Amino acid sequence: MLIKKPADLRYSDITPKQMYVNRRRFLTGSLAFGALAGAARGGMKLSDAKKTSYNVGDEKITPLEAITHYNNFYEFGTDKADPAENAKNFRTSPWTLKVEGAVAKPMTFDQDSLLKIAPLEERIYRHRCVEAWSIVVPWTGFPLAALLSQVQPTSKAKFVAFETYYDPKQMPRARWAGIEFPYVEGLRLDEAMHPLTLLAVGLYGETLPNQDGAPIRLVVPWKYGFKSAKSLVKIRLVEKMPPTTWNLSAPNEYGFYSNVNPKVDHPRWSQAKERRLGELFKRDTLMFNGYSEVASLYAGMDLRKNF
Amino acid sequence: MVFAACLVPFLLLLWPFWKLVTTGDAPELGANPVEYITHYTGTWTIRFLLITLCVTPLRKILNQPKLVRYRRMLGLFAFFYVCLHFMTWFILDKSFSLSDMWADVLKRRFITMGMLGFAMLLPLAITSTAGWVRRLGFVKWQRLHRLIYFAALAGVIHYYWLVKSDVRLPLMYGAILAVLMLYRFFMWKQSPVKRAAPRAAATTPNTASLPD
């Protein structure tokens, strides 16, 4: 039997980046006509997002590869590499996001209208995980406040509760995660209304990859990453402090506020330093993750008690 | 041959690590290479501890007394990987700071447990030579080396306390350790009966005292 010797691949054989990028642009461009079908898989260009001054100085933006292959998304497995693998076929179309509760005008958004709730902006934020690693992400999205002002919270609205998508059929690994689903999170109304609080629909100028919380997620840059709930299906304005998943799982380890705070350690590890992905040695963690403008939200509060 | 096999996990780590240090980029180690290396060396420590603890049951069940000659080497490999694990943490996580290290050891129970396991393996590695068996006398030496049971237990608890919510892997290693220890327990329960016969015969060489 003749066994063919496999051709040796040379560097010159690798498709030049420009070529496959152009091909992707062409494909996504054509898909854009097809009722935004391309958005279902992430990676569709969000070209009209406005650049903003939200930046992180001379800190480097984390490469896309790291942002998309080092994820905590327990519905798709607890290993950092699991979500990239297991969320590949996650269906984000059709999608429904309901905004309800103590509001004058409850609203429901579908896949297409998610991108049109408010003008899109690009913001570069630090993202600090409670596990003491961090990344810098160029998000595309709009302030949560823009959505809340549309639904008009009533005087009863004191907190905002977030619920994320859960389908055990699409997320079979969730049963091993050790936490309850659907994943729920919450913010105080003034935190939710803060101009830094973002609803993100994209990163690196394209729609969100599934493993990063497609099609729409919360981003609260001064809080530990788990507060920034992914793949939102419900936003509910409520009167009482809503339950939050990690707090339910281990109340002594994860508080409702979970503000990034180098002085308040996690019971099992220090929060004084963090490892920025791509760096060998750890760097100091900044109070409120460097977003000192939120400090006034917590004036007079004991942040050791309200961790 | 067994030696080379034990070295494989280390060699698999060496090349990506070299690339990481020289070029700063090693996709094999994922987005957080330090975490990867820490978990990798830690996992192989537990595995080698459990493999070492398999030697005696396998030797007896398969009736292959010769297997015992691999035991020291396997144990020393567990020590080798725990040293890598410790150095990764000390150098890349604690940045060579002894004070930071002690603060963590005292404050964080999973690190306390890990250090306890490491500390228990240290005398075992030192006294692993034939010279030390002679110096201590076999009975004392054997008693000392039962510390490996507690070192393995410390390793499993260290891992269990570290994970956030998915405890499947630490529980799996814990279950394997439990099986290996239960085997020893039942052998120990049976042993007076078993040993009674050769002892009664008086002239039979005491094979029961083969190290386990």
Image: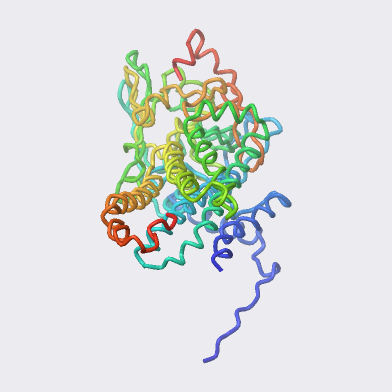
B3 to the left or right of B171: right
Q: Nearer the viewer, residue A3 or B104?
A: B104
Q: Position of residue A11 (x, y in %)?
A: 70, 67
Q: How is the image coloured?
A: rainbow
Q: Could you tell whether A102 is left or right of A215 in the image?
A: left
Q: Is A127 drawn above or below residue A69 in the view shown?
A: above
**Which residue is depicted at the point 64% across and 28% down?**
A284
Instruction: Decide which of A115, A162 is in the foreground and name it.
Output: A162
Name which residue lies at 67% across and 31% down. Answer: B97
Answer above or below: position of B76 versus A156. below
Q: Is residue A171 visible?
A: no
Residue B152 found in image quarter: top left
**Left or right: B58 with respect to A288?**
left
In the rendered image, the residue lying farthest to the bottom is A1
Position above or below: A21 against A277: below
Q: Describe residue B183's horizontal placement relative to residue A125 as left or right.
A: left
- The answer to whether residue B123 shows anywhere in this view is yes
Q: Position of residue A209 (x, y in %)?
A: 49, 47
Residue A8, image x and y in percent? Answer: 65, 75
Nearest the viewer among B163 and A174 is: B163
Number of marks in the rendered image: 0
Where does residue B197 sit, x and y in percent of width and height? Answer: 28, 60
Q: Nearer the viewer, residue B33 or A258?
A: B33
